[in-house]
Image (cartoon, rainbow, N blue to C red):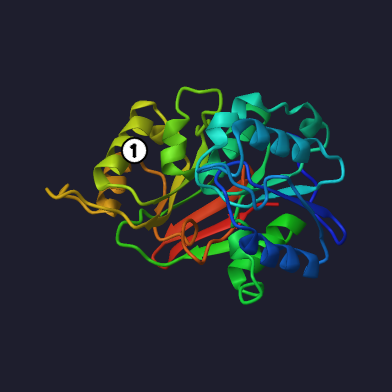
């Protein structure tokens, strides 16, 4: 594994938008915060632009992300937004220069496509992190935002989740993988499919019907993904929806039902995903997970 170097004062963070469009007014405050932290910022050509749903055509978004990945001056790439679009360009990326100088890929949601691809094909760590809209003057000193800075610069990373009646107590260690559940399921059978064997899996989701979540988890289970885990961490399940005829289970029940026969620890209520408080996770690095009567505790093992 080639580990991206941690950032220091003067390091360069590139910003690009390889998926959906985002307005420039959401990017500008992030640039100000990053520069106040002592970083230099380089903007890609897709920042503040749009082409229907996307920040640019497939060719434009591919070229912009490729330029950032190839740029020897760039030390990390922060995505402007997720949304949708990475799947349309992932197979066109050339990772040759990136592997010569790996850099932290930062984002979440649709960026799970790139995260999973990097782990599956190159064993590369990356950051499941907030994107540009989260970095503002009023949030820059919030604990979860400072957590992003610590993840980028090699600081200590330790997380706590409140008690849930659906938790399963236990302790385990393993590399962390995962991200957005619908994206992980979407990648099944592709060259970007995540290897979850002996990993601690993190999942989060937004704006899905309960039966959709049930179907996605069944897909992972039937593919043999869930039985081989070292642990399961469930982040935010935001704006879940039921059908007119009720599904009959709460979202937590749906998830726990898919892993009830296994014996690894399960942690719900983890503060990561599509909410304002969104902690940064170091994917593909070793972590210790403890779930007990006090809730969940996850710690990065240096």
Q: Is residue 120 visible?
A: no
* Viewer-closest of 216 and 44: 44
**Above/below status of 103 relative to 37:** above
Give me the residue at 81% from left, 30% from top.
Answer: 97
Residue 72 lies in quadrant: top right
Residue 175 at x, y percent in the picture: 58, 42
* Viewer-closest of 166 and 171: 166
* Viewer-closest of 130 and 224: 130
Q: Which residue is mark 1?
A: 217
Residue 112 lies in quadrant: top right
Residue 7 lies in quadrant: bottom right
Give me the residue at 82% from left, 53% from top.
Answer: 12
**Above/below status of 260 relative to 149:** above
Give me the residue at 74% from left, 68% from top.
Answer: 32
Relative to 207, 71 lies left or right: right
Q: Is residue 168 visible?
A: yes
């Amino acid at each position: 594994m080639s580990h991206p170097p941690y950032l220091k004062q003067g390091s360069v963070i590139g910003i690009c938008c390889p998926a959906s469009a985002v307005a420039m007014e959401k990017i500008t405050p992030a640039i100000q915060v990053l520069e106040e932290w002592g970083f230099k910022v380089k903007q890609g050509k897709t920042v503040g632009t749009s082409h229907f749903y996307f920040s640019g055509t497939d060719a434009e978004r591919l070229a912009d992300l490729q330029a950032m990945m190839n740029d020897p001056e760039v030390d990390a790439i922060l995505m402007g937004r997720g949304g949708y679009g990475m799947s349309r360009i992932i197979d066109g990326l050339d990772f040759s220069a990136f592997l010569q100088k790996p850099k932290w890929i930062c984002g979440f949601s649709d960026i799970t496509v790139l995260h999973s691809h990097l782990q599956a094909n190159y064993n590369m760590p990356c950051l499941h992190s907030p994107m540009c809209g989260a970095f503002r003057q009023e949030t820059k000193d919030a604990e979860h935002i400072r957590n992003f800075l610590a993840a980028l610069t090699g600081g200590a990373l330790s997380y706590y989740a409140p008690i849930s009646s659906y938790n399963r107590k236990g302790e385990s260690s393993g590399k962390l993988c995962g991200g957005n559940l619908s994206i992980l399921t979407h990648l099944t059978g592709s060259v970007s499919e995540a290897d979850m064997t002996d990993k601690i899996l993190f999942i989060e989701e937004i704006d899905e019907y309960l039966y959709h979540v049930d179907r996605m988890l069944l897909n992972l289970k039937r593919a043999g993904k869930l039985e081989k885990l070292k642990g399961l961490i469930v982040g935010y399940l935001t704006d879940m929806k039921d059908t007119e005829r009720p599904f009959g289970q709460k979202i937590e029940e749906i998830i726990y039902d898919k892993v009830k026969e296994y014996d690894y620890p399960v942690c719900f209520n983890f503060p990561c995903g599509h909410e304002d408080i969104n902690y940064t996770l170091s994917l593909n690095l070793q972590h210790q997970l403890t779930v007990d009567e006090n809730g969940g505790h996850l710690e990065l093992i240096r």
